[in-house]
Image: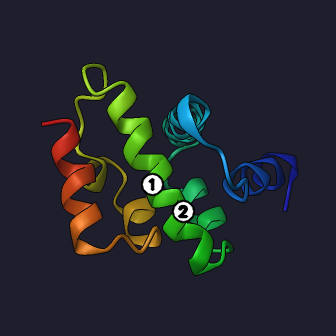
């Protein structure tokens, strides 16, 4: 892994962030997705354990919610590889998709 992918994986592995900091963490994760792109992000995400991906789903939900007026895309359409790699369950998937509609 190069420095960028190592740093991204470290950010993806952060746990137990509560309250407003959790929203900001989710927002940062989505901004990184936009800057790094679907291929790189999904490749790094593929190395993250499933138990952590479940936590990341929550961060993505609150990150999308914090800027729902700015994020005018459907995450499953714009970033399909990352969305699939998150292993989003049906209920969270509907939530992530509906936040920006």
Q: Which residue is mark 1?
A: 58
Question: Residue 39 or 28: which is nearer the viewer?
Answer: 28
Residue 4 location, x and y as percent? 79, 46
Judge left or right: residue 14 versus residue 82: right
Quarter location, residue 82:
bottom left
Question: Residue 97 or 20: which is nearer the viewer?
Answer: 20
- Is the Cβ of the residue at disc 2 closer than 8 Å to that at disc 1? yes
- In the depicted structure, whether residue 27 falls above or below residue 37: above
- In the depicted structure, whether residue 98 falls above or below residue 35: below
SS state under label 1? helix
SS state under label 2? helix
Most extreme residue toward the top, as rendered?
A: 70
Residue 91 location, x and y as percent? 22, 67
> In the image, which disc is placed on residue 55?
2
> In the image, which disc is placed on residue 50?
none
Most extreme residue toward the left, as rendered?
A: 101
Most extreme residue toward the front, as rendered?
A: 19
Please state the total of marks drawn on the protein image.
Answer: 2
Judge left or right: residue 16 versus residue 38: right
Question: Residue 60 or 36: which is nearer the viewer?
Answer: 60
Question: Residue 62 or 49: which is nearer the viewer?
Answer: 62
Q: CA distance from mark 2 to mark 1?
A: 5 Å
Q: Residue at x 27, y 51 (%)?
A: 96
Mark 1, other Cα within 10 Å: few <14 / some 14–19 / many ≥20: some
Mark 2, other Cα within 10 Å: few <14 / some 14–19 / many ≥20: some
């Amino acid at each position: 892994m190069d420095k960028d992918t190592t740093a991204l994986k470290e950010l993806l592995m952060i746990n137990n962030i509560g309250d407003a900091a959790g929203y900001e963490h989710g927002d940062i994760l989505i901004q990184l997705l936009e800057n790094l792109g679907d291929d790189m992000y999904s490749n790094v995400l593929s190395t993250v354990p499933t138990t952590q991906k479940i936590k990341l789903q929550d961060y993505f939900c609150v990150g999308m919610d914090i800027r729902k007026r700015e994020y005018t895309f459907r995450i499953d359409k714009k970033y399909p590889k990352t969305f699939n790699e998150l292993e989003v369950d049906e209920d969270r998937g509907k939530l992530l998709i509906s936040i920006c509609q």
